[in-house]
Image (spheres, helix red, strand yellow):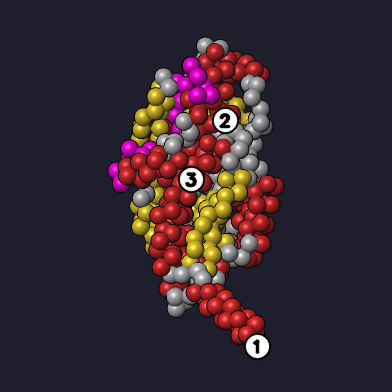
């Protein structure tokens, strides 16, 4: 009898403990944590982690234990899609921050969509990311159809180029960006002397540089990522070619200047991620980032932070709307799409496709290895 009473007591205690236990809630990041674009992927992941660290206490008050799980997509669509399947299988994950590459975001978000896992992108600019009409896919950055023309306008209006060589890395991001820039430049009377693609993994540009020497363009527009553009700039400058190189936010990494070495000169890029000195309220955040991760916060760290804030606030909004109950994925998906979020980069409201209604882009110049802000472009979605 004594043994039975003890067993009942233990069971009662366990039951009470389970009733009072916090529910585990996770958000995930999907970004390249290894490989040639890992610098940007780590910025996204660490920015999101900072947001999670800040909001853990608020989630605890609501009876939720908050954590982040990070997946390495290696900038590869198949790997990113596999990560998305793992997210779907983990029912405690209520939202995703990512990805860096549009070519990864498009298939990964499609995998997440049937399970209503909301996704907020800090970086994906290809139009197809949101134009497919998925209810779960959102982004806090501007699109290629804004960024490409901004870069093209810079080539025409600021650099005064008449002949331009256009290159892309054959990815949805690089090709989409280059296509939009080329369209904008042609509309303003620029002659495109050559427009072609080069595989994203290529690092030997001897043949391309020979073409450039022959064609003698006034500017080169290269839609690609810093891991490839850095070596391209170095090889180009080593041949004595000082032609301006222009591109998009795939250049937005401190590693670009390291890879370009002495060639880190006369390079310009548009970016959807703000320079930290352009966002006064980011100063304290950057200090916290440095203290936490022992590295400097960059623009995509800030965008990762803001994207995570959208997901996390969306979860809390859904929690309140559900009568202070842990929300379902569908409830979070709806709360993110219809919410208004006050972020470090400004207020975010999404349109029916998940695009940010108002955003900013920045033009960055690299001269002798040093970065400076060369201009700002306001983007309004109609």
Which sits in the foreground, 165 or 47?
47
Identify the residue under disc 3: 46
Secondary structure beneath dot 1 equals: loop
Side of 103 relative to 45 (left or right): right
Label 2: how many residues lie within 10 Å, few (<14), some (14-19) or many (20+)?
Answer: many
The answer to whether residue 277 is magenta is yes
Residue 20 visible in the snapshot? yes
| Disc 2/disc 3 C-alpha distance (Å) | 20 Å
Q: Which residues are magenta?
A: 258-281
Percent x, y of residue 197: 64, 32
Label 3: how many residues lie within 10 Å, few (<14), some (14-19) or many (20+)?
Answer: many
| Disc 2/disc 1 C-alpha distance (Å) | 72 Å
Identify the residue under disc 2: 227
Figure label count = 3
Side of 382 relative to 237 (left or right): left
Which sits in the foreground, 191 or 303?
303
Q: Which mark is residue 1?
A: 1
Nearer to us: label 2 or label 3:
3
Which sits in the foreground, 291 or 90?
291
């Amino acid at each position: 009898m004594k043994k039975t009473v003890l067993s009942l007591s233990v069971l009662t205690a366990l039951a009470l403990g389970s009733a009072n236990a916090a529910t585990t809630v996770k958000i995930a990041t999907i970004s390249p944590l290894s490989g040639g674009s890992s610098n940007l992927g780590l910025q996204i992941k660490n920015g999101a982690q900072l947001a999670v660290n800040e909001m853990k206490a608020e989630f605890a008050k609501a009876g939720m234990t908050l954590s982040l799980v990070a997946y390495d997509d290696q900038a590869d669509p198949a790997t990113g899609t596999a990560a998305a399947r793992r997210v779907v299988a983990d029912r405690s994950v209520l939202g995703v921050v990512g990805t860096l590459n549009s070519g990864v975001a498009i298939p990964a978000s499609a995998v997440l969509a049937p399970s209503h896992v909301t996704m907020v992108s800090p970086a994906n600019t290809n139009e197809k990311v949101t134009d497919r009409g998925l209810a779960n896919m959102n982004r806090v950055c501007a699109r290629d159809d804004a960024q490409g023309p901004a870069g093209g306008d810079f080539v025409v209006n600021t650099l005064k180029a008449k002949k331009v060589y256009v290159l892309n890395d054959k990815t949805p991001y690089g090709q989409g960006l280059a296509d939009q820039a080329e369209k904008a430049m042609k509309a303003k009377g620029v002659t495109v002397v050559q427009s072609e693609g080069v595989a994203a993994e290529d690092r030997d540009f001897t043949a391309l540089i020979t073409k450039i020497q022959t064609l003698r363009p006034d500017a080169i527009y290269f839609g690609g990522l810093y891991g490839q553009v850095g070596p391209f700039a170095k090889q180009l400058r080593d041949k004595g070619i000082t032609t301006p190189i222009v591109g998009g936010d795939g250049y937005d990494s401190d590693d670009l200047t390291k890879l370009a070495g002495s060639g880190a000169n006369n390079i310009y890029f548009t970016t959807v991620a703000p320079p930290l000195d352009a966002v006064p309220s980011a100063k304290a955040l950057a200090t916290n980032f440095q203290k936490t991760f022992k590295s400097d916060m960059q623009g995509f760290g800030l965008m990762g932070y803001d994207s995570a804030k959208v997901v996390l606030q969306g979860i809390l909004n859904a929690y309140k709307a559900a009568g202070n109950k842990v929300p379902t994925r569908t409830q979070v998906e709806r709360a993110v799409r219809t919410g208004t979020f006050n972020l470090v980069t400004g207020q975010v409201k999404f349109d029916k496709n998940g695009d940010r209604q108002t955003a900013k882009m920045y033009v960055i110049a690299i001269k002798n290895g040093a970065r400076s802000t060369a201009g700002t472009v306001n983007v309004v979605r109609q």
